[in-house]
């Protein structure tokens, strides 16, 4: 909560991240909780150019670095929006060219 409160502006969330949260839900209550969590945040989507970048990165790094499909889309969306991707999975994203990542806080 302290990290979130310290941000100078409300962060946006890629729509693919919202879909990941829903995918991990075990029941409708967890789906509702996920949607409630992101409700105050602007949702951003990848452009066609971002999707082309994601395809290129996925093709290049899936086998060699285990870049996942959704991770490629999320990374490309962040790059396309010129945003810093806040994540605890820095390892997943380190191979993506032009992507700026940040671990939001220490767990």
Image (tube, grey):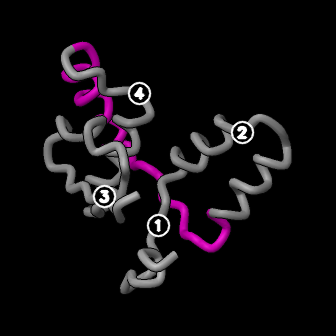
In the drawing, what numbered circle is on residue 56? none
Badge 2 local density, few (<14 within 10 Å), some, or many (20+)? some
Above or below — where is 29 with respect to 64?
below
SS class of the residue under badge 1? loop
Which residue is tagged 1? 12
Badge 3 local density, few (<14 within 10 Å), some, or many (20+)? few
Q: Position of residue 1 (x, y in %)?
A: 52, 75
Which residue is tagged 4? 69
* Residue pictured at 37% horizontal, 52% vertical: 87
* Residue pictured at 20% horizontal, 56% vertical: 100
Above or below — where is 94 with respect to 106?
above
Residue 66 seen in the figure: yes
Q: Which residues are magenta?
A: 38-63
Sooner in the amino-acid sequence: mark 3 or mark 1 = 1
Which residue is tagged 2? 25
User: Could you tell whether 1 is left or right of 35 in the image?
Assistant: left
């Amino acid at each position: 909560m302290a990290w979130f409160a310290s941000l100078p502006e409300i962060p946006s969330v890629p729509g693919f991240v919202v879909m990941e949260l829903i995918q991990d839900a075990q029941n409708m209550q967890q789906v509702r909780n996920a949607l409630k969590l992101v409700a105050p945040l602007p949702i951003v989507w990848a452009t066609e150019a971002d999707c082309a970048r994601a395809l290129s990165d996925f093709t290049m790094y899936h086998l060699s670095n285990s870049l996942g499909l959704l991770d490629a889309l999320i990374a490309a969306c962040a790059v396309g929006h010129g945003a810093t991707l806040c994540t605890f999975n820095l390892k997943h994203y380190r191979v993506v060219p032009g992507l700026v990542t940040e671990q939001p806080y220490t767990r």
